Image: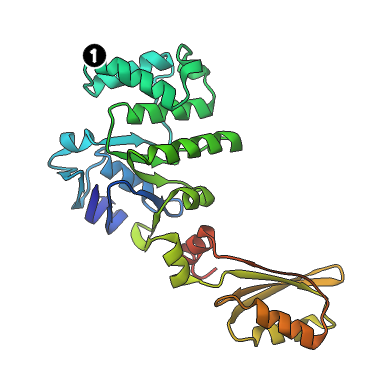
Amino acid sequence: MIKVENLTKRYGSVTAVNQISFEVAKGEIVGFLGPNGAGKSTTMKMLSCYLPPTSGRAEVAGYDIFSDSLRAREHIGYLPENAPLYADMRVGEYLAYRGSLKKIPGRRLKERVADMLDLCDLRDVERKIISNLSKGYRQRVGLADAMIHEPDLLILDEPTLGLDPTQIRQVRELIRNLSRHHTILLSSHILSEVEALCGRVIIIKQGQLQALDTPENLRSQLNSGGMTIFEVRVPEISAASRKLRGLTGVREETHERIGDWTRFTLQCDGDQREAIHTLAVQESWPVRELTRRATSLEDIFIEVTHPEE
């Protein structure tokens, strides 16, 4: 559905996107991640034909985004970070107007507006002025606008930005339902959301591709063991720290005092809880907690984009 080859965007001497290449297959939900200023929105604008690349090429549904832009746009639904809605229009009339701009025939347009009102749960606000809607409902209107012409590809830039937890959950469920009929490229700073929705993730930093794989494969490649929390009462913290660091598979250790107890946070290769427990038994340390947290997408993101931290 998407094929990107050495895509580059420069603004004078500043390179916002630097020769990135990737592919997204039909039916996938792919997360597009990076720190602020990494080039995510710029890339999405290029793929949506809103911004021409400086060099490189990209195809959407087999159409070049530069030389065959109009055909490519027919297959794209784009929701930018701040959806540019016409605030003085009513929801229903706005969707009808946007559908007409996208050249949906009259009878079919009426059907598509009705479908979007139902799919995006907008029936209750169909007659309301957009400026009077909550942020959550405005995001839903933006999604309906992006989908009304039945595109094959949805490009969603921060679709839950500014929403409360209930609204985030509702929009997340809507995106999950959309994946049955659309390929989705999704950018979000809420990494738990990306992890819940996306089969693969793309991570960029300073305009360059840093990682492209499933979260599971990235865990195995970058930090398979995750984090182990070991809360224990020890006679001497420094001595206990040395013994924990000496265990095979323990890569990093930090600790903090909590009353009479010490909480050790251990970065391990694999699951080292048995070895840690054995050490505690040998040293007669009373244990209050020994738990393992698998590597999250947030951990992967930090390791890829800020390896020194």
Q: Residue at x 59, y 75 (%)?
A: 271
Q: Residue at x 37, y 13 (%)?
A: 93
Kindly indicate the quadrant of the structure image that contains residue 169.
Answer: top right
On the question of residue 12 being in view, the answer is no
Q: Residue 233, percent across and down?
A: 83, 76
Q: Residue at x 46, y 54 (%)?
A: 35
In the displayed structure, does residue 6 sit left or right of residue 306?
left
Q: How is the image coloured?
A: rainbow
69 lies above or below 106: below
Q: Residue 214, percent across and down?
A: 40, 60
On the question of residue 134 being in view, the answer is yes
Q: Residue 268, percent across and down?
A: 58, 76
Neighbour class for label 1 at 10 Å: few (<14), some, many (≥20)?
Answer: few
Q: Residue furthest left?
A: 67
Q: Residue furthest top?
A: 127
290 lies above or below 164: below
Task: Say which residue label 1 marks.
Answer: 106
111 lies above or below 173: above
In the displayed structure, does residue 309 sit left or right of residue 113?
right
Q: Residue furthest right?
A: 260
Helix or strand or loop: what does disc 1 sit on?
Answer: helix
Residue 179 versus residue 8: which sits nearer the camera? Answer: 179
Kindly indicate the quadrant of the structure image that contains residue 72.
Answer: top left
Quarter of the picture containing the C terminus is bottom right
254 lies above or below 90: below
Q: Amino acid at mark 1?
A: Gly
